[in-house]
Amino acid sequence: MKAAVITFPGSNCDDDVVYTLREFAKFDVTTLWHQERPALGEFQLVVVPGGFSYGDYLRSGAVAALSPVMEKVKEYAGNGGLVLGICNGFQILCEARLLPGALAKNESSKFQCKDVYLKVEDTNTPWTNQMKPGEVVQYPIAHGDGRYVCEIDSKSLADVDGVLLTYCDAKGKNLPEANPNGSQLAIAGISNKARNVFGLMPHPERATDLRSQHGKKLWNSLLSHLNAKGGNA
Amino acid sequence: MRIPDSQPSTPDMAKSLGVTPDEYHHVCKKLERPPTFAELGIFSAMFSEHCSYKSSKPLLRRFPTTGKRVLQGPGENAGVLDIGNGWAVAFKMESHNHPSYIEPFQGAATGVGGIMRDVFTMGARPIANMNSLCFGSTDLEKTRSVVKGVVKGIGDYGNCVGVPTVAGQTLFHPCYNRNPLVNAFTLGLLKSDEIFRGFASGVGNLVVYVGSKTGRDGVHGASMASKEFSTEAEPDRPTVQVGDPFTEKLLLEATLEAMKAGLIIGIQDMGAAGLTSSSFEMAERAESGLEINLDNVPMRETGMSAFELMLSESQERMLLVCEPDKLEGLTKIFEKWELHSNVIGKVVEGHRVKIEKNGEVVVDLPVELVTVPPMASRPKVVPSDLKQRWFLDRNRLFTSSIEAKLDLVFTDINFASAQPIVHQYDSMVGNRTEGGTFDDAALLRLRDIPGSKSKLALTVDCNPRITWLAPREGGRRSVAEAAVNIAIMGGDPIGITDCLNFGSPENPEVMWQFEEAIEGISEACEALKIPVISGNVSFYNETDGVPIYPTPMIGMAGLVTDTQRVPKTSFASSEQDILLIGPAEGGLGGSVMTSLFFKRECGQPEDTDLNLLNRMLKFCERLRKTKFSYSIHDVSDGGLATAMLEMALHSAVPGIGFTAKIPQGADPDRFLFGETIPRVLVAIDPGHRTEIETLASQAGVGFTLIGETNESGEMKVLQGGLEVAKRPVAAIRTGWENRWKPCFE
Amino acid sequence: MKARVTIFYKEGVFDPQGNTVAESLRRLGFKTVQSARVGKVVDIELDSQHEKDTKAAVDKMCEKLLANPVIESFKTEIIGGA
Amino acid sequence: MKARVTIFYKEGVFDPQGNTVAESLRRLGFKTVQSARVGKVVDIELDSQHEKDTKAAVDKMCEKLLANPVIESFKTEIIGGA
Ligand SMILES: Nc1ncnc2c1ncn2[C@@H]1O[C@H](COP(=O)(O)OP(=O)(O)O)[C@@H](O)[C@H]1O
Ligand SMILES: [Mg+2]
């Protein structure tokens, strides 16, 4: 299985994801520099990692979304390729319009790094098929601009397509105090209509062989999805 | 009006730039002419206390700096220790006190940037930051805004570069009201045979400038750091720089990539005194000469003079030396990382630095004249009121109840959850951080070293209250406390860095404190057989003539090799026995309780027993090799009462409570509030108690069964079977969690 | 020519910084403060002559990079001659 | 009354954000961009009537909280009536 991890100037979780994909999910991992315009067809997964691309200057993810490599990522996603954006990667995917919505400054206006609980909202996806509906997983967050804002003024999750993870408490309740950044409808991770592009603020790669280890469920979901497809995405 | 770079200087100019008449005389005599104005600028920066160590150098020689792990001791950008398997760690700590008072956010941010550059300059990838912060009274509006800005500055910079901030210390005391301390520590990982150093060697090699363009910012930063603050100081131009963590990250990656490709001979960051210190120091180490043409320095502003270019402290810049045929490869790497680079000079025969601007030689100086400044002679004297400070009125203490004293300690500003600070730092990026961020020391796995199960333990510690009362004991105790913290987390101490924050060296009492603290640190390091591998001195920490409490901050690294467990530092369940390992009583001199009770620090601190310290480390080592689980925490600020409560406050067990029994014959104050080191608390299932007691006996440390955990939700103190104090954990928790929050509103 | 772009969160998107600023100001004794909004301002120096073309170019910059229409609104103006 | 405060780094103080914005705009094809500076703008709604007093109060707010005179300069203006 082959995965590509993209490095932008200022990415800083690229190595963490490479390590996790290699050690845990046994991917053959290639790193790509943002200036490249490679053919991505050979990869079963493309990861846009966390960090501070372009220093988060102007707006998190805004400058990176315009990088040459992103044209290729759009093409790849358009062909149904799996694209995962974590933290700053999520911000980049939203800025690149590969995912709906936007990420605004945390409600506290402060950077927040801590473990949070997440409720699994949809398991019929390449990313969550090894999780149970309503299951609670624990991943850390580390961001200053993680407040998800929907494009439409939705009052309930039923109105929003593609929500895979929401912030909740240990028991799975979406309480306001369990929402670390004020995200609309407590949305922590969302996918596109086709479910092949997924972005989330929390860091599964930091919870794979350390901390809760719940990150494994995400990688296992991916592997089982890819294996079911016989490895040709 | 502007003075031309090449104009001969005058004694008046020297004076206004802070060069003393003696120093100026010395320079003129050696040069056989007055230095040019640009040259004078160079002397003013390099002879400043911050760059020259003119008051401290002879005293720093006292430190033990050798050992079998030492690959690089003091003298380079950072020290390096061998950790086995062909790998090493580089680390150092540095202060950014004065800038952080003037512009807290940028001051602290650029402090973190500077120390990280010092570490990756050695060829090491930074994997952990720590910070140690001392602030004034939170009653002051200014303090609160400084706290908020400093914490945000440290967080934003480290988070952006992607180096986790894994541990630190925060302390509030009015002595820091107008002079907060911001000490930043960075540790990096490297292969032990791939250490880079600041050498400008090889005649004909090129001197390359890389990083941000040079502006006028910070001209005179180094001399600012060496002047006392006066309240009316209103700088007429920005002396604080703006940090650019994004460029720092690019510089980090580009530098490590170029090193790996074998394209770099020597390298140094442009820190304090920018281009001046980097060029002269690199020439000094290599005993070489340099020719530099300032017209090739990338500039952000127009019309900059040589004086300004040489003294600018624009951030995120490096100076390096490469062979001419490597230049193309080097340039390619920098271009890939979107960085400016330029050849600005070359290595030449002889031992002089010659600097040209607009076709005119404006500086031509022998290297040694600049790098070996005349030492300042600083008299020392024992503070005249030391004996008064040592008086502790025990009789008055007896008049107050235990409950009243507990309340004093539990409402102290320094007894607080660090969460409002810690959660602003990314403590996990890099995927190495194990354990919680609230443990006694940080634990990092070394996933980079194939097959290695070793981990690093890191901590920073200092006790300024004790150091003010007894500086030698203060130095000793800071090292001892750090060592206990490392041992608790499963590590053996391997070395320290220090950041010595003191008042004015022109004050003989301060110089006495300084010498004593160094003696104490050295004694403790010798007892532990660990070296001092790097450090930093920050003098002139005072406002309007009142020095801060002497604050010799210790950053310690330990290596965990014989265990995989991550010890718990909070209570794991109810119905466990609590054992106090070490002496049942501790000294009250300089303790938190007595300081609060008498509203000033008083009493003579008791000496740390360094032999006992070693035995305690032995005990911790044996303990971690046992099979059963335990919780462990050391007794420090606030004494046993605080330590027990902390174990409850961090506990996830609902309704956790505990009792503490004052042992028969023990002095209640000394038992509950004494702060002698080492004392360690261990909580275990009762079935394992005798095993622990046996381990303690074998290691030669005393032990006392002092209580047990329960689900009462209360802290109870018993004496002779009677309840003498009771406090609900939940109420204390509320205060503890919220105490620092007002600083961040 | 010099252009200025002013960017705020859209009406309806919570502005935490504005909120904090208003609260802090009131705490400092500025009791008349009702509310505050914090935005970004970008001043751009351009090598161009025609005011109209320049403004059009800057509007394009906003659409392409400077503002995110999902959460932000912007205003452009020319504030300095060639 | 409504006041606007515009805050930039002082002339001569490095503005890394502005730098990155200018470079990105040029990369996007806006070749006429010479330089950019990024600042903050704060709009404050006040319960007050007198323009002069209000401006004076807002200037105070800047000194006390909104700007750090060591590295920043600010401008205040009244942009809306009572
Ligand atoms: N208190 C100290 N203890 C040990 N070494 C010190 C101490 N102070 C300074 N040094 C060493 O002296 C050298 C110069 O220090 P410094 O000027 O802080 O470095 P830099 O130029 O990188 O800022 C460094 O190698 C540092 O490790
Ligand atoms: Mg250095």
Image (spheres, coloured by chain):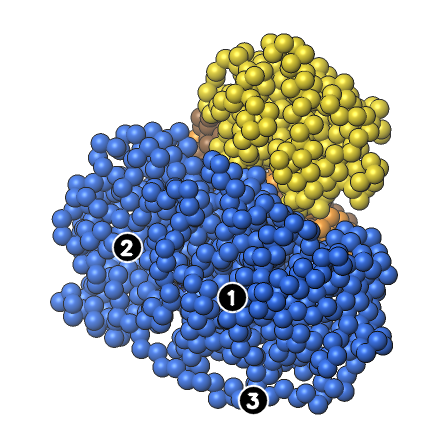
Chain colours: A yellow, B blue, C orange, D brown
- Quote the CA–CA distance across marks 1 and 3: 33 Å
Residue B365 badge: none
Residue B388 badge: 3
The quarter holding residue B398 reads: bottom right
The percent coordinates of residue B554 (x first, y second) are: 49, 63
- Of the 4 image quadrants, the one containing the N terminus of chain B is bottom left
Above or below for B409 versus A153: below
* Chain where mark 1 sits: B
Q: Find numbered disc 1 in the image and state the secondary structure of the residue it sits on.
A: helix
Type of residue at label 3?
Gln
User: Which residue position holds label 1?
Assistant: B614
The percent coordinates of residue A9 (x first, y second) are: 48, 32
Labels 3 and 2 in the same subunit: yes
The percent coordinates of residue A160 (x first, y second) are: 79, 24
Q: Which residue is drawn at 63% across and 33% down?
A: A208
Disc 1, ligand 1: is the CB inside 8 Å? Answer: no
| One can see residue B281 in this view | yes
Q: Find numbered disc 3 in the image and state the secondary structure of the residue it sits on.
A: helix
Above or below for B173 versus B112: below
User: Which residue position holds label 2?
Assistant: B281
Q: Residue at x 63, y 73 (%)?
A: B583
